[in-house]
Image: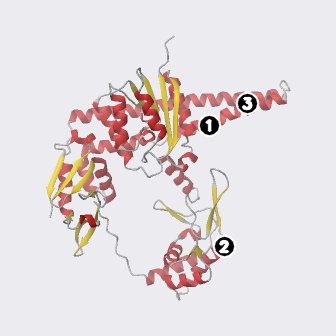
């Protein structure tokens, strides 16, 4: 009998929210164990940790690498997907060296990628690009968590910390409700009532309520506290989340809508229109010779410059935004993808997506079959109990055993079926680069432009005379030149 090839599993969650939202370590392990069984691998060790991949010192990750590098024969590293394994370019380079210079095969199961020393340049390119896309968002919760929070908002549950006047009351490990804070709520109500008279400003109202004992934590309430409270629709049973207003909230309102909108009218009549805060496209992207980030500034009301705020960069010339724009646009114009390269990339992405769908469908069908079998067993078991062909003790023993197994299968089914198509989002980023990055950049918002710049460049450097833009190694084959330098003034 042929000996099974060894497999090593790596799983990770990067936040408490991920672990509690069904994105847990046990769910990942079960998914990868099923995959190993289907492929005929023998799982010899599992590495698990709860830590963000952007941080250094992942002990289990480092331990796993040491073991894999010592393997002399074919072995397999199984991970759910790219962003569970890594989140930065250094990790991507490490894993690339692992599968290109050893007998280790890296399986990113939900991305439908298997990488080894025989992988094509196109497969390696896609892997590195997926890694680059993931590295843009190291501090965000996973898409799965965000999706769950939006779903909670749609159902009327505010997915965050309750505002002043309310408390988060956890009813179980996974659920919480928002209740009225009996100590703070009367102050909130009074703030609305007093401000609606037109006799108070934010500042004078804050002083009055502070004297009466209104505190936020250990501090007296401030002008900012009052302003924040009076603008918040939460107190009339509504809330804003992710740019959308939700009108049918489950928490108890503190004030009437009439009072709230009376206050808004008073605020609008008193408040002068605010100037829109300028969004500086390149702030935080450009470094000085001393490795400090440049920030945007407006001169003479219309000219945008970038400067260092650190004393070590004293004397460093200001950098005109116009010069940066010219260089960046030149960089995007020079982006060239040979037709044969693009065709190979598109073909591989299509294959990955189709394979992912097929594997997940097969997994769901297999789980559903097991669920049906267990439900049938439980029904038959109950009939046998009614017919008294089995003892009460035997009935409850088997019922508990099969019910636990059934619950686990249902969790696994939901875990797979609710998985968002992150692979498609990453593929879209690659296709944009291959097809029409220049026009996509020009027509994008400031945030979209920043995302593309982070995806393509490793760094900008301004030395006072020249601005240098360095392209990420992964993308250099797609540019007519890999180094961009220009003078500024």
Mark 2, Cα crowd under 10 Å, few <14 / some 14-19 / many 20+, is: few
Q: Residue furthest front?
A: 312
Residue 308 in view here: no
Residue 254 in view here: yes
Q: What is the secondary structure assignment of the residue under circle 1?
A: helix
Of residues 270 and 295, the one nearer the viewer is 295
Q: Residue furthest bottom?
A: 199
Compared across the picture, whether 212 is left or right of 418 comes to right
Q: Which residue is identified by label 1?
A: 410
What is the C-alpha distance between the residues marked 1 and 3? 15 Å
Mark 3, Cα crowd under 10 Å, few <14 / some 14-19 / many 20+, is: some
Mark 1, Cα crowd under 10 Å, few <14 / some 14-19 / many 20+, is: some
Picture quarter containing residue 475?
Answer: top left
Compared across the picture, whether 380 is left or right of 312 comes to right
Q: What is the secondary structure assignment of the residue under circle 2?
A: loop
Q: Do tag 1 and tag 2 residues touch (Cβ < 8 Å)?
A: no
Q: Which residue is identified by label 2?
A: 183
Whole-percent x and y of residue 7? Answer: 48, 26
Q: Is residue 94 above or below residue 190?
A: above
- Between marks 2 and 3 in the image, the one whose residue lies nearer the viewer: 2
Q: How many marks?
A: 3
Q: What is the secondary structure assignment of the residue under circle 3?
A: helix
Nearest to N terminus: mark 1 or mark 2: 2
Nearest to N terminus: mark 1 or mark 3: 3
- Between marks 1 and 2 in the image, the one whose residue lies nearer the viewer: 2
Picture quarter containing residue 274?
Answer: bottom left
Q: Which residue is identified by label 3?
A: 378
What is the C-alpha distance between the residues marked 1 and 2? 43 Å
What is the C-alpha distance between the residues marked 2 and 3? 51 Å
Whole-percent x and y of residue 265? Answer: 49, 80
Q: Quadrant of the C terminus?
A: bottom left
């Amino acid at each position: 009998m042929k000996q099974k090839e060894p497999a090593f599993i790596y799983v990770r969650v990067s936040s408490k929210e991920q672990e509690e939202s069904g994105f847990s370590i046990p769910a990942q392990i079960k998914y990868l164990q099923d995959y190993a069984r289907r492929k005929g691998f023998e799982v010899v060790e599992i590495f698990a940790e709860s830590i963000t991949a952007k941080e250094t010192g992942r002990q289990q990750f480092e331990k796993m690498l040491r073991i894999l590098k010592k393997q002399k024969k074919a072995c397999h590293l199984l991970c759910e997907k790219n962003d569970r394994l890594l989140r930065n370019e250094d990790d991507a380079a490490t894993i690339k060296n692992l599968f290109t210079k050893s007998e280790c095969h890296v399986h990113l199961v939900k991305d439908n990628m298997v990488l080894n020393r025989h992988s094509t340049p196109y497969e390696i390119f896609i892997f590195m690009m997926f890694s680059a896309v993931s590295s843009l968002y190291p501090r965000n919760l996973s898409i799965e968590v965000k999706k769950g929070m939006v779903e909670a908002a749609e159902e009327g549950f505010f997915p965050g910390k309750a505002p002043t006047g309310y408390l988060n009351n956890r009813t179980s490990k996974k659920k919480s409700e928002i209740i009225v804070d009996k100590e703070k709520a009367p102050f909130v109500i009074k703030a609305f009532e007093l401000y609606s008279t037109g006799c108070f400003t934010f500042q004078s109202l804050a002083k009055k309520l502070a004297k009466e004992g209104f505190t936020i934590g250990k501090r007296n309430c401030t002008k900012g506290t009052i302003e924040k409270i009076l603008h918040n629709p939460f107190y009339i049973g509504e809330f804003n989340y992710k740019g959308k207003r939700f009108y049918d909230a489950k928490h108890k309102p503190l004030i009437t809508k009439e009072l709230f909108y009376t206050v808004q009218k008073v605020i609008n009549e008193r408040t002068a229109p605010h100037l829109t805060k300028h969004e500086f496209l390149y702030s935080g992207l450009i470094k000085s010779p001393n490795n400090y980030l440049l920030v945007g500034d407006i001169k003479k009301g219309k000219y945008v410059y970038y400067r260092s705020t650190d004393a070590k960069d004293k004397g460093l010339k200001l950098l005109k935004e116009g010069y940066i724009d010219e260089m960046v646009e030149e960089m995007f114009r020079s982006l060239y993808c040979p037709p044969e390269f693009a065709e190979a990339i598109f073909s591989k992405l299509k294959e990955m997506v189709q394979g992912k769908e097929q594997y997940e469908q097969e997994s769901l069908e297999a789980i559903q079959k097991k669920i049906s079998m267990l439900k049938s067993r439980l029904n038959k078991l109950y009939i046998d109990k009614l017919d008294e062909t089995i003892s009460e003790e035997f009935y409850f023993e088997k019922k508990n055993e099969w019910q636990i197994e059934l619950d686990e299968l249902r969790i696994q089914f939901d875990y797979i079926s609710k998985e968002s198509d992150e692979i498609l989002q990453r593929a879209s980023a690659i296709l944009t680069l291959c097809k029409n990055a220049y026009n996509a950049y020009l027509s994008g918002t400031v945030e979209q432009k920043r995302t593309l710049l982070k995806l393509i460049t490793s760094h900008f450097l301004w030395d006072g005379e020249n601005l240098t833009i360095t392209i990420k190694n992964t993308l250099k084959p797609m540019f007519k030149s890999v180094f961009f330098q220009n003078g500024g003034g």
